[in-house]
Amino acid sequence: MSDFQEAAGKLRIPGFKTAFFLFLLLGMLLSGLPAQEEEDEEDVVFKGAGIHVRLGGGYALLSGGDFHKGIQGLYEWGAQSIVDHGYTLGKSDEHPLRSGYELGGDIVYYLAGRLGIGLGGSLTRVNKTNEQRFSFGNLPYGMTVVPQIDIFSFRLGLFYALPLNRLLTVCFNAGPAYYSVDYRLSVNITEAAYRYSMTQKAEAGTLGVQGAVGLEIRMNPRMAFILEVQGRHARISGFEGKEQLYEYLGGPVSTSEASGIVYYLEKEGFSRLEISPDPPAAGFNAREAVFDISGVSFRAGLNFKF
């Protein structure tokens, strides 16, 4: 198995998605536990150290920017190349790079009643498998384009809790955040006497802002269930990494490797991403690729009070 095929296999591991659903299952199980006897009395309110640990996960929507357009164009270029070689296109299974799953948490210290300050972090994984089937006669072949982007966020937030009644509290938070992005891409095309593989790996980071509004549903004096919508804004460029190419032409094998900046360019009528130590030649409408993570997340979780 080549390094390129091995990399493509690793990108398909659904461990993050599994952890996300296991966490939500744990939350539903905990929400079904009987509350302590003391919570039956409305005048009993838990007064602890003012520390809240908020854990949750959810579904994230984002813009994608040049990375969305570049990977989309690469997929379209591959399909056109297949047609140009005389193959018949079959089923296409395409997924835009605009959504993923998120897990994270915050530790909040309430200074005085409703106002608190918190530190938190999360991991958002955007993993898509795009497949184009094609054939020559009765012989089936395929192309796969598998991007994976891991977004690590580290945030500082100001929290404000507004109780509506004994059971419901509306919570607001906002503040700066640092976003670190780990980008991976694997492309594989298999034809009768031809193999094409490409991998890209790059990283970058930047500062941004985030804010959220949520509803806490009291389960018992020390725990609440959270439903939250979070917004974020950040545009990241200056990705640095490595690109590897592998081609098998029925006999000779061609390989190449380049390190440098991730560029967005338009080539042969299709947009694409390319890693190069130098800017692409003039005429390709090239620029440093920008990953736009601006968007919203819909999260559910638990708030543990100490």
Image: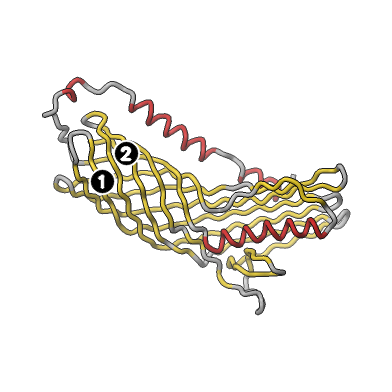
Asked if the residues shown at circle 1 and circle 2 are in contact, with their CB atoms under 8 angstroms apart, the answer is: yes
Residue 226 numbered tag = 2
Residue 39: image x %, image y %?
Answer: 18, 25
- Residue 286 sits in which quadrant? bottom right
Which residue occupies the extreme left position in the image?
43
The answer to whether one can see residue 7 in this image is no
Left or right, residue 183 beside residue 193: left
Query: Residue 185: percent from the left, percent from the top?
Result: 62, 54
Residue at disc 2, secondary structure: strand
Q: Position of residue 177 (x, y in %)?
A: 36, 57
Q: Nearer the viewer, residue 71 or 47?
A: 71
Q: Residue furthest bottom?
A: 282
User: Whole-percent x and y of residue 142?
Assistant: 75, 47
Residue type at tag 2: Ile
**Left or right, residue 76 beside residue 13:** right
Residue at which label 1 appears: 171
- The residue located at (70%, 50%) in the rendering is 4
Q: Quadrant of the C terminus?
A: top left
- Kindly indicate the quadrant of the structure image that contains residue 298: top left
Display colour scheme:
secondary structure
| 15 vs 5: above or below | above
Image mark for residue 234:
none
| Residue at (55, 55) in percent of width and height | 183
Q: Give the left or right position of residue 116, taking residue 209 as reference.
A: left
Vertical arrangement, residue 28 with respect to residue 69, above or below: above
Instruction: State the quadrant of the N terminus.
Output: top right
For the residues marked 1 and 2, what is the alpha-carbon distance in whole angstroms? 9 Å
Q: Residue at x 25, y 40 (%)?
A: 52
